[in-house]
């Protein structure tokens, strides 16, 4: 006849095991279970509400839900059992993925040169007077900023007896014609074009000597 054992049938509750000790059955909860082993053991948690507000029920254990939740350069806080991620100071982005360093704003600069950049426009110059930009046209340019322009681009912009040379209206004759020649310049406006014409006229000084006059006289007599 077999000797009865105190653990058969088990005197323990659910999720508990029985061990014989000194001829009597001793009940203990399974690992990670708690409660009265003779009445029944339960896991640490089944729902988040079984845990403190800064813990979550993970695999029947009340644990910190933050590890591995937030991205780089982000902090994690547990609010009502749920992890909440925020970028650390001076960083921005998606805290659950990656937070980037905020671009640094340049320090406030001192009042600079009002002529940099120049507000004057092309063919002009800028100078600072009492902290203000004063604009004027470059030498050889006419008009007023920002509309400074050369004196001429084509000869039609000059007077009738002037030609546009190097963007200046000048007399084109000096040095043009040969010895004993007279120069005339004319701007001609044609139906579809404009022409600048130089004409050289030959000077003939007919000075007859007394000998030539006498020879002519005898030849005619």
Image (cartoon, grey):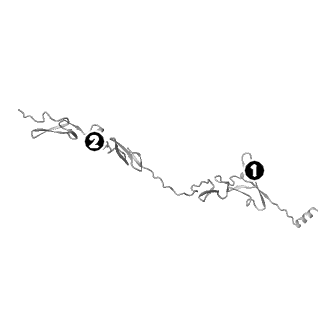
Numbered mark located on residue 137 in the image? none
The residue sitting at the top extreme is 1
The percent coordinates of residue 140 (x first, y second) are 67, 58
Numbered mark located on residue 188 in the image? 1
The percent coordinates of residue 75 (x first, y second) are 36, 47
Q: Disc 1 or 2, which lies upstream in sequence?
A: 2
Of helix, strand and loop, which one carries label 1? strand
Numbered mark located on residue 62 in the image? 2
Q: Name the side, left or right, on which 171 lies relative to 205.
A: left
User: Split into 4 quadrants, where in the image is the N terminus?
Assistant: top left
Q: Residues within 10 Å of mark 1 (few under 14, many from 20)?
A: some
Q: Residues within 10 Å of mark 2 (few under 14, many from 20)?
A: many
Q: Which residue lies at the image location 71% right of the left edge and 52% below the top edge?
A: 157
Give the label, 1 or 2, closer to the camera: 2
Q: For the residues marked 1 and 2, what is the alpha-carbon distance in whole angstroms?
A: 102 Å
Q: Name the side, left or right, on which 91 lies relative to 17.
A: right
**Pointer 1 and pointer 2: residues touching (CB < 8 Å)?**
no
The percent coordinates of residue 35 (x first, y second) are 21, 39
Q: Which residue lies at the image location 92% right of the left edge and 63% below the top edge?
A: 217
Of helix, strand and loop, which one carries label 2? strand
Asked whether 35 or 155 is in front, the reply is 35
Asked whether 218 or 164 is in front, the reply is 164
User: Split into 4 quadrants, where in the image is the C terminus?
Assistant: bottom right
């Amino acid at each position: 006849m077999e000797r009865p054992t105190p653990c058969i049938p088990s005197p323990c509750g659910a999720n508990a095991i029985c061990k014989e000790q000194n001829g009597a059955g001793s009940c203990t909860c399974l690992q990670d279970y708690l409660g009265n082993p003779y009445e029944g053991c339960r896991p640490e948690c089944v729902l988040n509400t079984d845990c403190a507000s800064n813990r979550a029920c993970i695999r029947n254990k009340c644990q910190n839900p933050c590890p591995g939740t937030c991205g780089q350069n982000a902090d994690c806080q547990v609010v009502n059992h749920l992890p909440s991620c925020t970028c650390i100071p001076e960083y921005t982005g998606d805290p659950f993925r990656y937070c980037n360093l905020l671009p640094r704003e340049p320090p406030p600069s001192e009042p600079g040169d009002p002529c940099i950049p120049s507000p004057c426009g092309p063919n002009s110059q800028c100078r600072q007077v009492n902290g203000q930009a004063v604009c004027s046209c470059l030498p050889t340019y006419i008009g007023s900023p920002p509309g400074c322009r050369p004196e001429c681009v084509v000869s039609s912009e000059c007077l009738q007896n002037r030609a546009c040379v190097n963007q200046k209206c000048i007399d084109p004759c000096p040095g043009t014609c040969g010895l004993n020649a007279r120069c005339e310049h004319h701007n001609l406006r044609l139906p579809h074009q404009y022409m600048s014409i130089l004409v050289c006229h030959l000077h003939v000084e007919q000075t007859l000597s007394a000998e030539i006059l006498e020879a002519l006289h005898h030849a005619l007599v």
